[in-house]
Amino acid sequence: MSNLVKLIDLPPLGDDRGSLVAVEANKTVPFDIKRVYYIFGTKPGVARGFHAHKALKQVAVCVTGSCRMLLDNGREKEELLLDSPTKGLVIEDLVWREMHDFTPDCVLLVLASEHYDEADYIRNYDDFLKVVGV
């Protein structure tokens, strides 16, 4: 894997009753968590994302189902299938992200380092390339 893709382990806890994953800021997740959201019910053939953030960092976890993640720092691109509730994908700032091929049951949980701020978004790919100096 490249330096672009960083997966973190989210160890399951549990017993014969089932499993539980604990997510903790600055322990399992490498930053303070200021916002949590999840994406679900994505229609077949719909892709999401298509943006980068100037400062925000995120961890994305497919709680159920799967989706294909494309990460791009302007110099390299990497794709991976996110399909485990015990793996978190760390998405650093200034990384273009796209999400494709959602399964019908996909629930994508996202943990963010900052509160929502529209000014932090870069929504145009050419603008993104200028910001990262490519």
Image (tube, helix red, strand yellow):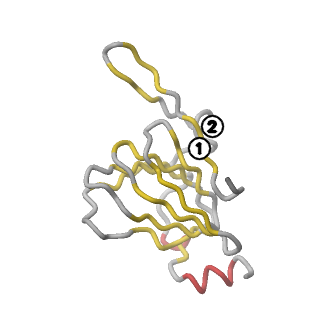
**Amino acid marked by disc 2:** Asn
Q: Residue farthest to the right?
A: 133
Q: Are marks 1 and 2 in contact (CB under 8 Å)?
A: yes
Q: Position of residue 14 (x, y in %)?
A: 41, 18
Cα–Cα gap, marks 1 and 2: 6 Å
Q: In the rendered image of this protein, does residue 115 appear above or below residue 118?
A: above
- In what element is the residue under mark 1? loop
Where is the C terminus found, in terms of image quarters?
bottom right
Q: Residue farthest to the top?
A: 16
Q: Residues within 10 Å of mark 1 (few under 14, many from 20)?
A: some
Residue position marked by numbered label 1 in the rendering: 32
Q: Position of residue 73 (x, y in %)?
A: 66, 69
Q: In the rendered image of this protein, does residue 98 appear above or below residue 60?
A: below
**Amino acid marked by disc 1:** Asp
Q: Residues within 10 Å of mark 2 (few under 14, many from 20)?
A: few
Determine the image quadrant of residue 57: bottom right
Q: Is 118 on the left-hand or right-hand side of 43? A: right
- In what element is the residue under mark 2? loop
Q: Is 3 on the left-hand or right-hand side of 31? A: right
Name the residue located 51 percent from the left edge and 40 percent from the top edge. Answer: 87
Per the rendering, the mark at residue 26 is: 2
Pick whichever of labels 1 and 2 is earlier in the sequence.
2
